[in-house]
Image: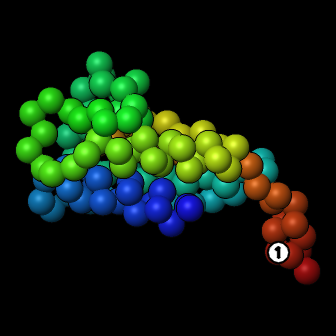
C-alpha cells in the first residue's frame, strides 16, 4: 500500500509542478514514527483548498491535467489504514509539502544500529 502512497504523491508533484521544479522525498524514524515527506518547489496550494485536497473527487479549479480527483483521497485512506496521518502545508519558500506519519516500532531498528 505504501508504494501507492508514494507513487500518487510523486505523480501529483510531477503532473502539477512547473518544468524544472525539484521534487524531494525524505524518510526518517522519530519517536516510534515513520516520517515520509514529499515536497516540491512548485506553486503550492491556495490556502482555501488545503483542507479539501484529500476529499474524494476534489480537483483544484483551473486544473487542465487529466485526473479523477481520487489520488490524494487514496493516499489518505492508505495512510489511515496504517493508523497514520497525512498533512499538507505550503513551504515558506514556495511549493507544497506532504507529511506522512505512521506508527513504527523503532526500538527494534535502534537495537540493530547498536549491535
Please give the name of the residue rendered at 87% of the width and 66% of the height, measured from the top-left corner: 108
Location of residue 40 with respect to 26 vertically, above or below: above
Q: Quadrant of the N terminus?
A: bottom right
Q: Is residue 111 left or right of residue 29?
A: right
Q: Is residue 29 left or right of residue 42?
A: right
Query: Residue 98: image x %, image y %?
Result: 44, 44
Query: Residue 55: image x %, image y %?
Result: 39, 31
Location of residue 45 with respect to 65 vertically, above or below: above
- Which residue, as the protein is rendered here, is positioned at the far bottom? 115
Q: Nearer the viewer, residue 92 or 3?
A: 3
Query: Residue 105: image x %, image y %?
Result: 82, 58
Location of residue 19 with respect to 112 vertically, above or below: above
Residue at the spot of label 1? 113
Location of residue 12 with respect to 109 vertically, above or below: above
Which quadrant holds residue 6? bottom left
Q: How many marks?
A: 1
Please give the name of the residue rendered at 91% of the width and 80% of the height, measured from the top-left corner: 115
Residue 93 visible in the picture: no
Q: Nearer the viewer, residue 16 or 107?
A: 16
Please give the name of the residue rendered at 36% of the width and 49% of the height, measured from the top-left corner: 71
Q: Is residue 5 left or right of residue 105?
A: left
Query: Residue 87: image x %, image y %?
Result: 49, 36
Please, which colouring scheme is shown?
rainbow
Residue 19 visible in the picture: yes
Which quadrant holds residue 2? bottom right
Q: Is residue 78 left or right of residue 54?
A: right
Task: Classify mark 1: helix, strand or loop.
Answer: helix
- Which residue, as the protein is rendered here, is positioned at the far top? 48
Q: Nearer the viewer, residue 114 or 12?
A: 12
Answer few, some or many: residues within 10 Å of disc 1's Cα (few below 14, many 20 plus, some between 14 and 19): few
Please give the name of the residue rendered at 29% of the width and 33% of the height, measured from the top-left corner: 58
Amino acid at each position: 500500500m505504501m508504494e501507492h502512497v508514494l507513487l500518487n504523491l510523486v505523480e501529483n508533484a510531477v503532473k502539477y509542478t512547473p518544468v524544472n521544479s525539484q521534487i524531494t522525498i525524505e524518510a526518517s524514524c522519530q519517536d516510534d514514527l515513520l516520517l515520509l515527506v514529499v515536497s516540491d518547489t512548485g506553486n503550492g496550494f491556495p490556502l482555501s483548498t488545503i483542507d479539501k485536497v484529500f476529499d474524494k473527487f476534489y480537483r483544484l479549479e483551473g486544473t487542465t491535467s487529466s485526473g479523477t480527483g481520487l489520488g490524494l483521497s487514496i493516499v489518505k485512506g492508505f495512510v489511515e489504514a496504517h493508523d497514520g496521518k497525512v498533512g499538507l502545508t505550503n513551504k515558506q519558500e514556495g511549493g507544497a509539502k506532504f507529511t506522512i506519519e505512521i506508527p513504527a516500532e523503532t526500538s527494534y531498528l535502534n537495537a540493530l544500529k547498536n549491535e
